[in-house]
Amino acid sequence: MQANAVALIVLGLLFLTGLAVDQLGRRTRLPRVTLLLLCGLFAGTAGADLIPRSVQDLYPVVSVIALGMVAFLLGGELSLSTMRTHGREILAISLSVVIATMTIVSTGLWAIGIPASAALLIGALATATDPAAIYDVIRQKHAKGGFSRTLKGIVAIDDAWGVILFALIIVLAQGLEGSETGPHVLLAGLAEVAGSILLGIAIGLPAAYLTGRLSGGEPLRIEALGLVFLTTGLALWFGLSYLIAGMTVGAVIVNAARHHTKAFREIEHLEWPFMIIFFILAGASLDATALLTVGPLGLAYVVLRILGRVLGGWIGGIAANAPTPERALYGPALLPQAGVAIGMALIASDLFPDHGAAIMALAVSATVVFELIGPLAASWAIARTEKTRS
């Protein structure tokens, strides 16, 4: 009973901390994502160790719920009208950023002496982003211009590109190491993407027809929660990507439902409390000492990834004929990196035990860096575009 009381007290304090951080972010214009992560880093095991284990153990569940909501909302940005207006930019920039990041990071690490297979795997990790951080920065900035809409679309499909590329790179890396299991891994990666999309369609089509009708009006919050929990739960049950599945559900509903307009506003009303706990516990889980274990390799990775994102965004912006002032800003806006990269690192370390320790240390240290500086860079990029348009 006392342990439950402590957990409830800590959760209450975390919610109030989130409220204070929100107000601080409004006054200082600092991304509240970064502020929440710093609070978690200070209060977590790497800092004052103020958060009890019973609360920290909630992180896996809270992260799935929060990211499931983000995926649902990002899918809602992929309406036919948005794709007609910004589809060329979304596809060109997202592919260009992924390819440029992969190429520059892998080539750069190989050039400084990292084995080719490990360099390829680390390059694949570098393509992952943190959709929750980017989406929250956009919301905090109240950004509604073409840049922010394109950015949401890029983040929405980024996970799919990442999974496909990661599967391809594993096949190539296993070929370099003499393994014969590569084709099976590639098929598994492609099956995960296809299965996640099919699951999203299977849930999204009936949801598009039913949501809002059951209550005789606009969708209720309970319907929104039901969709998020059902989608993420089934995706985890079948070993699929709940981010891709959730994004597909959102995209199907926004394009197929014609009898209401508020399907995604209900998620927005529910999302912030989960995001507060998610980012604070994410900060608490960060291991700042990991920065000391990777040394020059970590510094090289950070520099190369920044270069790859900026160059890829600029090239993609040119290919899509995006407004000239925005071309150099897509890369900085796509710097945040978190859970997806850690997940990829776990898979890579399991398949390549010789490189596993280095890959995991690099992934953890990069998460610390890009989760702290990424939202700041995204906030700056969005502010620059809003100022240019005004």
Image (cartoon, helix red, strand yellow):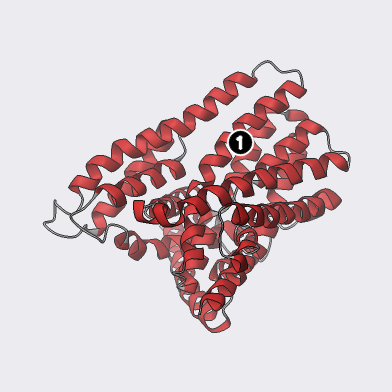
Q: Quadrant location of the N terminus? A: bottom left
Residue 104 appears in the rendering: yes
Which residue is depicted at the point 77% across and 50% down? 301
Q: Position of residue 366 (x, y in %)?
A: 70, 53
Observer-nearest of 158 and 29: 158
Q: Which residue is mark 1?
A: 165
**Relative vertical location of residue 282 with respect to residue 24 in this rendering, above or below:** above
**Relative vertical location of residue 269 with respect to residue 229 in this rendering, above or below:** below
**Relative vertical location of residue 384 with respect to residue 246 in this rendering, above or below:** below
Q: Position of residue 98 (x, y in %)?
A: 63, 45
Whether residue 197 sits left or right of residue 334 in the image: it is left
Whether residue 54 sits left or right of residue 215 in the image: it is right
Q: Position of residue 56 (x, y in %)?
A: 53, 54
Amino acid identity at mark 1:
Leu
Circle 1 — which element?
helix
Total number of numbered labels? 1
**Relative vertical location of residue 258 with respect to residue 34 in this rendering, above or below:** above
Whether residue 351 sits left or right of residue 114 in the image: it is left
Residue 69 appears in the rendering: no
Which residue is depicted at the point 66% across and 31% down? 169
What residue occupies the far bottom of the structure in this picture?
27
What residue occupies the far top of the structure in this picture?
180
User: Quick one: label 1, few (<14), some, or many (20+) residues within 10 Å?
Assistant: many
Q: Position of residue 237 (x, y in %)?
A: 40, 33
Which residue is depicted at the point 59% across and 75% down? 30
